[in-house]
Image (spheres, coloured by chain):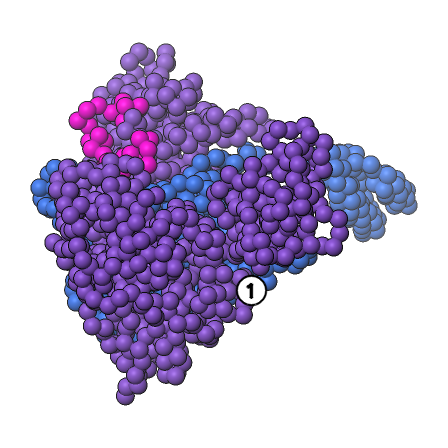
Chain colours: A purple, B blue
Amino acid sequence: MRLPLSWLHDHVAPDLTPRELATRLAMTGTEVDRIDHHGVDALEHFVVGKVLTCVQHPDADRLRVCTVDLGDGGEPAQIVCGAPNVAAGQTVAVARPGSIMPDGTKLKASKLRGQTSAGMILAEDEVALGDDHAGIMELDGTLAAGTPLADVLPISDTVLELEVTPNRPDCLGVYGVAREVHAATGAPLGAPPWADDPHPAGDGIPGVSITVEVPELNPRFTARAYEDVTIGPSPAWLRARLLAAGIRTINNVVDITNYVMWLTGQPLHAFDLDRVAGGTLNVRRARDGEKLLTLDDVERTLDPDVLVIEDADGPTSIAGVMGGQRSEVQAGTTRVLMEVATWDGPNMNRTMAKLQLRSEAGARNEKGLAPEQALEAQAVASRLMVELTGATPVGGTIDVGGPGAAPQVIRLRDARVVSLLGAPIDRATSSGILTALGFGVREADDGLDVTVPPFRRLDVTREADLIEEVARLNGFDALPSTIPENRTGFPGRLTPQQRLRRRAEDVLVGRGLAEAVGWSFTEPALLDRLRIPEGHRLRQVVELENPMSEAQSILRPTIVGSLLDVAAHNAARGQGDVAIFESGTVYLRHGDPAQPLADEHHALAALVTGPMSPASWRGGTGPLADVFAAKGLLEAVAEALRVELSFKACADWPFLHPGRTAEVLLGGTRVGFVGEVHPAVAAGWDLAGRPVGLFAVNLEQLVAAAPEVVAYRDVTSFPAVRQDLAVVVPDTVPAADVAALVAQVADEVRIFDVYAGEQVGPGKTSVALRVAFRAKDRTLAEEDIARLRGKLVKRLEKELGGELRG
Amino acid sequence: MSTTLDRIAALSDEARAAIAGAGTTAALEELRVGYLGRKAELPNLLRGVAQLAPEERGLVGKAANQARKELEALIEERGSTLAAGELDARLVADAVDVTLPGTPAQAVGRLHVLTATRREIEDVFCGLGFTVVEGPEVELVHYNFDALNHDPAHPARGRSDTFYVRRPQSVLDAVGPDPAQEVVLRTHTSPMQPRAMAAQAPPIAIIVPGRVYRRDSDATHTPQFHQIEGLAVDEDITLADLKGTLLAFARAIFGDERDVRLRPHFFPFTEPSVEVDVSCFQCGGTGALPRTGARCNLCKGTGWLEILGSGMVDPNVLGMVPTGEYDPERWQGFAFGMGVERIAMLKHAVPDLRLFYDNDLRFLAQFG
């Protein structure tokens, strides 16, 4: 809401600079987005001038050379002017060199085709008084040369751009803001501009009838009629105000509707009464598919949720939002029907959303205005119609619906003020604040009985709402700062799951990975880029109804796309060695087809490509990261959480290398995968050429399996006997099976070498393991070890077709 | 007899001089072998004492023994001196260029600045007695708007502001046309207020970190961002408690000298509603930079930085908790919601919100 200060000062004039006023408003609940200067600056250079002579420019057909008396006692100024209507003897508005024009440029003396020009004779658009540039303004001839122009024309104003919260439509009118300023500053508030209603009394207008079919959506409809209207431009003061407020000027009648809306917060609509067929207006729901050409030249297709105002020939307005062209006020209009009505806010909101049509009127109506405001706007409009258009009222006021419900009285308890705020506000202060805001106040035993004015009816309905009013105007500076006692019975803390999640993330950070935070959104094409076939679970994505773009139209079913995007982004910037992870949510449609919410889980995923450690001066970098690099990271996470994972070769993920992928199992349940990105997929992200190791797991499942409390295990009693074993097995046997079998006999089993080649023979692999033999109850003797090894030999032979070779 | 004693004296003199002149531990070892070793003369004299005349035995034996002990001590002493010198020399020769980097080169990982900031905030509120709860990002309109007292016409509900999720026919068949059962990407972490209150009787003190979504995209808005919600409800929690809690938070995050101020505002789910500003940590709240006096660019000369929205929980929100355990005549409390990006931007002077989501390694390496 743009608020020209000159307009505000009609009603309240606090002794504050614009900045001080803005701060005071901000501290009482009305944010000021910016303070804007409207019109010209360096006002001392704008004066009234008298054109003494005016001759054709010797070298330019369209220019005249004038001498102008500027009343400064010196030589008349020579000014070159291009306006066709300039003539000797005129009284004109002049900008002297040094003037600052509305666009901020500074006027300088110049030469035009060889003739000096010491200033400019002004057209109205040049001082932001209109958009007319057809000719210069001719001023009242009685004005003396040298009169400051600002005394004659409203050429400069300061405008506050207010951010009005949606609960305060009363502050979408200048007088409403004035009331707020009055309450915030104590400066006296003038009488409401609608205090006197000059319109003739009476409840009818000859030849006009109004009906409302939907009173629940249109609680009040008022109309007044005028004849002898002369359409023409509005006076300068009115145009200046509307332009400063950011509203285009059209003609006097339309300008009056806009002016009154800006002043009262209540929208109005003017019909050309001669073009209201049958003199009847009826408010009803639109019919499905009904069409209407609105004032903005767009044909709108309507439905029964939209209200229309119709005359005998059909719809003529979209109620509360925008008029139609058929009954628009225009150049020849002489009879005007002024409609001011109250509409259901949510219905207005839906109408505008549905038609993708917003207007200043609709923006006020959707907030839900008070029916009382209708006649306030009519009263102000009546006066202006008579004054500015020469109109004569016809009949009285048609009023369908009447005023709103009787005002609510709410008790404001002193004790409740203290208990909610934590500090008292004395009753007299509260009373003063509420009175200034337009509330009625009466003393009660334990506080105040407060009557809510109609313009706050929807916003203030409870005691808490009154407490907010007195608190915000009393200010919060005096409020003490206290810390509430924790009586929940629990300390403040993270849950074990949250702590473990942090632990998992910290493990990866500790291993040199950078955490990325990706987008939850992704593109449907991601599923194709990842080669996910139709029918795959990862295809059951959550889709947005109104995405900002196709590229952000679904929620990611996996973090893989996010990590590949980050790797590609960095590779494209010469940072191709990437070791990153993300800990975040992934989304799928719920497994239960009747469940509206998604299946969300917290996933942990990492991507590594390039050398596993940075280059060192002592030689080389680590080997290139691959499936084992990714697996090592995941094993570290599992070890940190103390969960036991197992891995099984698996080719279920079409975006992974089919020979270098394992499913990750936790107690037999699949919780994720580890592998290398399929080279064809990696190429799609320009990551081809080097392996890209990747793992992704459901972190919630890992965390759920992690022990919350670890019990002590004996470490000291009896020493272990450490040995290296070499086991030769057929090369079809996974190393994990060998290790698992050995682990049934020995502890701390670790594979430290794997060999295939001549020495073990074709089709065989040698797996070297470091193990510890130990017993709980004694130190093992040599014959014990021999017995255990013997057992191992038998089982290797029987279960894996292998042998122990050392 | 005198010849033997003289010989001992001569040997001793000779050995003393040689030991004093020994330049290395190796040379000293040769001397030890030469004067005191198995084949050396002095020990042999000692071994030959038995063949001497009885009157000589005592004198010669004593003199030879003394000479041996003296030489042993001298060798020991000289040996220590030489060894120390030799070690010094070896260490000097063993010097390296200690300015070379450590090996192997260690990659240092980093938490994302959003995670680091979130954790820091979580820890502050844990210290203030809050527990951390989380909730779904794909959320019902009921929890996102209705249960938070949003007017049916509240603009945030619009398709232009909020992401709506397409519901398959099977869901539409199951839930019918009820608009409360429409599904959105949550626009704030506030839906966990009603969810948590439905799950836990008062008193309650929680914070809710998480991702939220709004249809907005420019240098100061991304369609996805992170919030931390706070909710404390008890019989006597006041606006002053909100101020104190957020003051403690602001000081923990932005420095002990910070102050906060409350500015009235409007939110559908709090009454009274306030926006909270923290005094600018760049200019110390004066609005002017200390050295130059120039207008502070961070707070734009106001001395204050807006950090979050908050207020006293609206009685309607309490009253709508389906368990009926939050009677607004008995229970009251505060709620707040802050943007993690906003806090991180302020604290680390990050100029553009989108940097958080580019995940450029050069950006990631700077924080966490």
In this view, A451 is above or below A588: below
What secondary structure is the magenta-colored segment mainly?
A: loop
Q: Nearer the viewer, residue A142 or A612?
A: A142
Residue at 15%, 42% (x, y): give it. A313
Residue at 57%, 34% (x, y): give it. B103
Residue A639, given in percent of the width and then of the height, sits at: 35, 42
Residue A271, given in percent of the width and then of the height, sits at: 26, 49
**Which quadrant of the rendered structure holds the C terminus of chain A?**
top left
* Label 1 SS: loop
Magenta includes B88? no
Amino acid tagged 1? Thr
Rendered image quadrant of residue A356: top left
Residue B217, given in percent of the width and then of the height, sits at: 40, 40
Is residue A7 shown to the viewer in this render?
A: yes
In this view, A528 is above or below A704: above
Q: Where does the magenta region start and end?
A: A527-555
Residue most extreme to the bottom: A445
Residue most extreme to the front: A89
Rendered image quadrant of residue A744: top left
Residue most extreme to the left: B173
**Which quadrant of the rendered structure holds the N terminus of chain A?**
bottom left
Label 1 packing within 10 angstroms: few (<14), some (14-19), many (20+): few
Residue located beneath label 1 in the image:
A17
Rendered image quadrant of residue A342: bottom left
Q: Nearer the viewer, residue A253 or A672?
A: A253
